[in-house]
């Protein structure tokens, strides 16, 4: 009998797609908020508790170190599915965030930040896998690229929240840290009331075709179903780390991890500890400069979302690395310039670097097929978090040792390295530009 179902990946956007997308949006806002809040809180903590540059950097990098668990989370998602992990992670995220209120022990704070990072790893890795496996193929890249806008809203909101929360004396910095509980709970409650469905593609990859077909028809209608390729596919063998570093995935895993790591080193190092860096740069009102910088980050992701639609992924990657490095070089050479000119160059740097963040979600996802997608994306995020954690840990240390110029010099070197890696090895993944 001839198979008559249409491939569900060709279905038009519907309420189930938007429901899943909103669940991911709320998670991205919470994740951006939690990652951004530590710098503002810890810069205040130095006024109330005994904490040196080492611990400021280490606790600030804690959530990014936790994100290094993305490879493990991806592997678990490939083995056991996406849905249950996404239903639970934001509740745990909120609990760990709230616990920051009741301790000033530096080791405990570091552990809590790592655990928060591990929950963020689930949203990054598992959430993106589920999203791309539900979204219509024509809409997937565009909607994934726009997730960074909502992450940035959360990140900027954390900076503004850190400025606005005052009047709690020696506990002010703890309240700032724990404020990520609120967006976390909003995301968790939404996912409980508007439940996330399982991934049809994952079910099919496990040989559960009947369950996948029922799920698709429940949410999209009777005429939609799995593709013939998915129906005929066999359950894949367990994905090991060795698989991702063997042909045909080796180059994609290395590029996906290293581009992300080099980008994250500079972005997180500068953005999380922006108050410390701006004070060292002597640009006047550091709060105002910080608001300008973060506004430019938001403008950058909006511009990046537009550029994403019209140029190739490869050119976009290479361009953002080299242009942002040039902007930092100009900033280092412009010590004698007026504060207004320095802030202007810093703003241009923020726009260029943040525009490249748009690639962080769709590009790693596009590098891997369904059999290894969650594991592959998780491994790329794990590699990237070593870069992000290194940048976050080193920036306060470097700024203390050699001022803002030393911190920016190291960031410039890392950005140039990222540009060279992409120039040599980054594959094109945009359907529009693949020949």
Image (cartoon, helix red, strand yellow):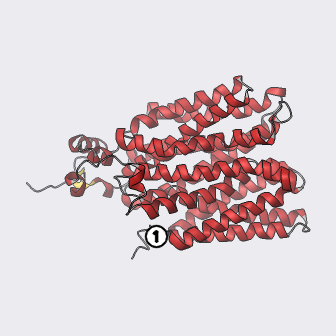
Please state if 85 lies on the left or on the right of 323 as rendered. left
Picture quadrant of residue 316: bottom right
Question: Residue 169's quadrant in the figure?
Answer: top right
Residue 237 at least partly seen: yes
- The structure residue drawn at horizontal position 39% and vertical position 48%, both measured from the top left corner, is 240
- Residue 402, placed above or below residue 95: below
Q: Which residue lies furthest to the top in this view?
A: 102
* Visible residue check, residue 283: no
Instruction: Please provide percent x and percent y for residue 409.
Output: 77, 63
> Mark 1: few, some, or many residues within 10 Å (few <14, many ≥20)?
some
Q: Where is residue 76 in the image (x, y as percent from the top left)?
A: 41, 40
Q: Where is residue 140 in the image (x, y as percent from the top left)?
A: 43, 57
Q: Position of residue 258 (x, y in %)?
A: 56, 60
Q: Tell me if 27 is positioned left or right of 264 in this view.
A: left
Left or right, residue 113 beside residue 7 = right
Q: In this view, does 412 lie to the left or right of 371?
A: right
- Seen as rendered, the residue at the extreme left is 1
According to the picture, the residue beneath numbered tag 1 turns out to be 428
Name the residue located 59 percent from the left edge and 58 percent from the top edge: 357
Q: How many labels does the image show?
A: 1
For the point 53% across and 57% down, the residue is 257
- Name the image quarter holding residue 407: bottom right
Q: In which quarter of the image is the N terminus?
A: bottom left
Q: Residue at x 85, y 56 (%)?
A: 402
> Which of the pair 141/317 is nearer the observer?
317
């Amino acid at each position: 009998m001839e198979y008559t179902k249409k491939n569900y990946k060709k279905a038009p956007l519907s309420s189930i797609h938007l429901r899943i997308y909103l669940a991911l949006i709320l998670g991205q806002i919470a994740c951006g908020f939690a990652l951004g809040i530590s710098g503002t809180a810890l810069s205040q903590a130095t006024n109330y508790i005994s904490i040196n540059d080492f611990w400021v950097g280490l606790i600030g990098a804690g959530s990014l170190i936790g994100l290094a668990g993305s490879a493990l989370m991806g592997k678990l998602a490939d083995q056991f599915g996406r849905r249950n992990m996404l239903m639970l992670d934001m509740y745990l995220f909120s609990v760990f965030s709230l616990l920051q209120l009741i301790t000033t022990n530096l080791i405990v704070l570091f552990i809590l930040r790592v655990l928060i990072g591990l929950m963020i790893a689930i949203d990054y890795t598992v959430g993106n896998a589920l999203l791309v496996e539900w979204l219509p193929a024509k809409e997937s890249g565009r909607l994934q690229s726009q997730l960074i806008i909502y992450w940035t809203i959360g990140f900027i909101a954390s900076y503004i929240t850190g400025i606005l929360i005052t009047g709690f004396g020696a506990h002010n910095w703890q309240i700032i840290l724990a404020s990520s509980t609120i967006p976390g709970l909003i995301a968790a409650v939404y996912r409980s009331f508007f439940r996330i469905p399982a991934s049809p593609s994952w079910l099919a990859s496990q040989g559960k075709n009947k369950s996948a077909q029922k799920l698709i028809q429940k949410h999209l209608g009777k005429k939609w179903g799995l593709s013939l390729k998915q129906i005929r596919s066999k359950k894949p063998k367990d994905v090991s780390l060795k698989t991702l570093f063997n042909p045909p995935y080796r180059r994609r895993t290395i590029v996906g991890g290293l581009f992300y790591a080099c980008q994250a080193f500079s972005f997180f190092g500068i953005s999380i500890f922006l108050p410390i860096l701006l004070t060292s740069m002597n640009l006047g009102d550091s709060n105002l400069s910080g608001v300008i910088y973060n506004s430019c980050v938001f403008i950058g992701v909006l511009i990046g979302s537009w550029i994403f639609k019209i140029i190739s992924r490869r050119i976009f990657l290479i361009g953002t690395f080299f242009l942002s490095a040039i902007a930092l070089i100009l900033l280092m050479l412009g010590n004698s310039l007026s504060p207004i000119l320095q802030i202007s160059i810093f703003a241009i740097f923020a726009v260029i670097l943040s525009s490249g963040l748009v690639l962080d979600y769709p590009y790693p996802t596009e590098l891997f097929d369904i059999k290894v997608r969650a594991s592959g994306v998780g491994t790329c995020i794990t590699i990237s978090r070593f870069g992000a954690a290194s940048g976050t840990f080193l920036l306060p240390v470097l700024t203390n040792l050699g001022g803002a110029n030393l911190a920016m010099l190291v960031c410039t070197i890392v950005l140039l390295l990222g540009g060279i890696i992409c120039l040599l090895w980054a594959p094109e993944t945009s359907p529009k530009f693949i020949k």
